[in-house]
Amino acid sequence: MFIGASGAGKSTIINQLAGRQLQKTGAVRLGDQRGKHTTTSSHLYFISPEFGYLIDTPGIKEIGLVNNDQSGLFSDIDALAAQCKFRNCRHENEPGRAVQAAITSGQLDAERFQRYRKYQRELQRHLKRDGR
């Protein structure tokens, strides 16, 4: 089963694996190079004897967080953040930014840090919505 964001390319992957168009796909938007939402219902497709069956689902807008336990998902960034000069460091313009220094030196991938920041924003939004 393929599950993912709307426009991520799930149907395109299924079509490529099958070697034929099983599911309608839309054009890619020029602005952000993302696909357009096309799939509107879930379908089970027989791909081939090698791949078997796949289920294509419509894109999802959001996956809820079950709890705020990161379980070490970003423990490397948390460890770097603990080395920052200020406890409330936003890792942007403050002096003594260990996280930014790690990105500059190549110790930390900038895209990984962006995923961390996105995760933190989502977590805060969910906690606020749930009244925590």
Image (tube, rainbow, N blue to C red):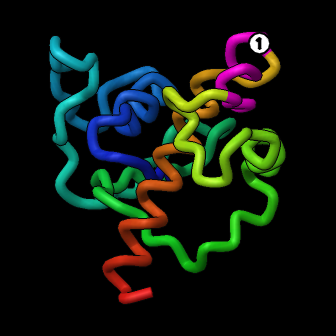
The amino acid at mark 1 is: Gly
Judged from the image, the secondary structure of the residue bearing numbered disc 1 is loop
Residue 64: where, in percent of width, then height?
44, 71
Q: Residue at x 44, y 35 (%)?
A: 14
Residue 54: where, in percent of width, then height?
50, 50
Q: Residue at x 29, y 57 (%)?
A: 61
Residue 58 vertical placement versus 110 (above, below): below
Residues drawn in magenta: 96-106
Q: Residue at x 48, y 65 (%)?
A: 123
Q: Which residue is mark 1?
A: 106
Other residues around mark 1 within 10 Å, as few (<14) / some (14–19) / many (≥20): few
Left-right relation of 106 to 125: right
Residue 103: where, in percent of width, then height?
69, 19
- Where residue 21 sits, quadrant-wise, is top left
In the image, 32 versus 56, the foreground residue is 32
Left-right relation of 131 to 35: right
- Where residue 48 sits, quadrant-wise, is top right
In the image, 87 versus 66, the foreground residue is 87
